[in-house]
Image (cartoon, grey):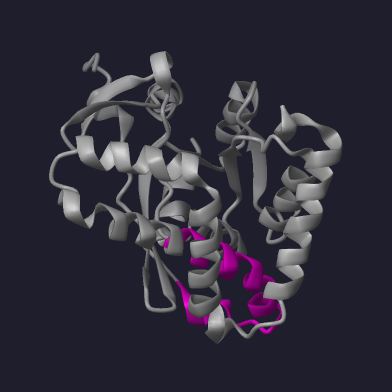
Amino acid sequence: RWRRWAPFQYFLYLVLRSVVMVIDMFPYAMAPQVGKWLGRLIHRIDRKHARIAVKNLERSRGVCPPDEIPAFIGRVYRHIGLGFVEMLMMPRLMERHEISRYVKMEGFHRVKEALAQGRGLIIVIGHLGNWELAGLAGALTGIPLHSLARPIENPWVDRYLNRFRTQTGQKIISKYQALGSMVRVLRNNETLVIQVDQDARHHGVYVDFFGRPASTHRSPALLSLKYGTPVAVANVYREGQVHHSILSEPILPDAFKDHPD
């Protein structure tokens, strides 16, 4: 109930803007130290998701020995903190035209090759590396990016985050009632980005994920088959302060039209 109360939501928004103001005082070289501190703070506050992480790691095969789970989760929260700090420092790098020093786009020539076929392109991605930064950098290269995203419950935070996400030309499509917008992107021969690593519940198709069935989104495959749109997979990871965003060879739907699965 508290999270949905407008005065409390606005208070959280003010807290966020205060954090942003403090982070903006530090140079980009200090992002790892600031991110580590912020990640620890989030870990202390976010007990609910830390417990969920413990449960998932205990049930998943081949990920982490039981005695290493607390340290593993600590690294996850440091990664989250660092990604948030990097994202907030990115406008400064864009003003100085330094973004190419820190973000390496690999294989993105395939976007223009795919769009030359006139059927658009679907890019599937997960919450890997600094995915927000990859979207900003991708739009800077001139790719017409339209990214599907779930709106944040807090309307002030949602508007603030979307202003940030769209500053390089990326367009955001709300996850709710998005089908018409997704189809228009493909018909306009543009690029649709869909994150597929969250629970699709009973609407999804079950695949094996670390030894457990996980419901994943089927919409990229259905759109690809219906409109003849190729699908490419993006991998995003960090090496030191350099972010690599790598695009795979497109998967062509014609090869799969006779396969019901």
| The image quarter in which residue 229 lies | top left
Position of residue 8 relative to residue 83, above or below, is above
| Quarter of the image that includes the C terminus | top left
Residue 232 appears in the picture as rendered = yes
Which residue is drawn at the image coordinates 72% and 81% (left, top)?
A: 25
| The image quarter in which residue 183 lies | top right
| The image quarter in which residue 175 lies | top right
Position of residue 7 relative to residue 212, above or below, is below
Residues drawn in magenta: 79-103
Position of residue 55 relative to residue 139, above or below, is above
Residue 82 counted in the magenta span: yes
Residue furthest to the right:
7
Q: Position of residue 154 (x, y in %)?
A: 74, 39
Depth check, front residue: 18 or 191 = 18
Which residue is drawn at the image coordinates 27% and 20% (left, top)?
A: 257
Depth check, front residue: 173 or 21 = 21
Position of residue 8 relative to residue 166, above or below, is above
Q: Position of residue 35 (x, y in %)?
A: 52, 70
Depth check, front residue: 186 or 20 = 20
Predominant SS along the magenta part: helix
Which residue is drawn at the image coordinates 65% and 52% (left, top)?
A: 170
